[in-house]
Image: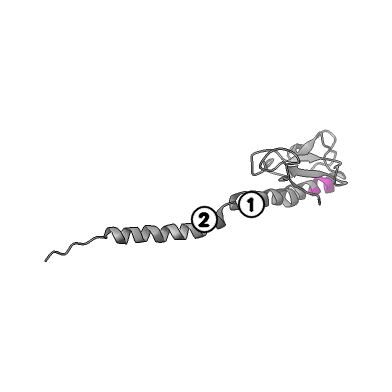
Amino acid sequence: MNNKEGFTLIELMLVVVIVGVLVSMVAPRLVGRSEEAKIVAARADINANISVALDLYELDNGKYPETGEGLAALLAKPGSSLKWKGPYLKKLPLDPWGSSYIYRSPGDHNIDYDLYSHGPDKVEGGGDDVFNWET
């Protein structure tokens, strides 16, 4: 008896073709998802995490931190604060692209403050900025 075990070349090629077809069907759906996830994370930081800390600061102090104090006022007591009960954040978060969030108070777009990220291109106004105001 000549009983050889293993796969033939045709069987291997068939498996490679099937895997290739599956990858070609799934890959386009996954492309761009990581950038979309980063945008969602930036929106969550801006509209929830940092905003809640700013609201707590305002509740304690009667006003939001000034632009010059920036978001650092959420970590350490600024000189202008009389009733600071922080820290309001454990650390200052960076946006998902590794840059600092931009904070302005009073804001140009909101009465209280503007909070935004320049997005993936790290350039203001590139169309991919993530911000806390309506367009």
Q: Residue furthest left?
A: 1
Please name which of the two marks, 1 or 2, marks the residue nearer to the observer: 2
Of residues 49 and 134, the one drawn nearer to the viewer in this rendering: 134
Q: Quadrant of residue 121?
A: top right
What's drawn in magenta, residue-wise? 55-60
For image coordinates 43% across by 57% down, the residue present is 20
Tell me how the rendering is colored. Answer: one colour
Task: Provide residue 90's location: percent of width, then percent of height.
Answer: 68, 43
Real-space Cα separation, disc 1 to disc 2, in angstroms = 15 Å
Give the residue type that dot 2 points to: Ala
Q: Quadrant of residue 71?
A: top right
Task: Provide residue 88's location: percent of width, then percent of height.
Answer: 74, 45
Crowding around mark 1 (Cα neighbors within 10 Å: few <14, some 14 to 19, many 20+) is: few
Of residues 74 and 23, the one drawn nearer to the viewer in this rendering: 23
The answer to whether 77 is drawn above or below residue 39 in the figure is above
Instruction: Return the disc, 1 or 2, that comes first in the chain's sequence.
Output: 2
Of residues 3 and 104, the one drawn nearer to the viewer in this rendering: 3
42 with respect to 24 (left or right)? right
Using the rendered image of the protein, determine whether residue 25 is visible from the camera's viewpoint: yes
The answer to whether 113 is drawn above or below residue 12 in the figure is above
Give the residue type that dot 1 points to: Glu
Q: Secondary structure at mark 2?
A: helix
For image coordinates 18% across by 62% down, the residue present is 4
Q: Quadrant of the N terminus?
A: bottom left
- Judged by its main secondary structure, the magenta piece is helix
Asked if the stretch drawn in magenta spans residue 87, the answer is: no
Check disc 1 and report the residue beneath it. 36
Q: Secondary structure at mark 1?
A: helix
32 with respect to 15 (left or right)? right
For image coordinates 67% across by 49% down, the residue present is 39
Check disc 2 and report the residue beneath it. 27
Using the rendered image of the protein, determine whether residue 86 is visible from the camera's viewpoint: no
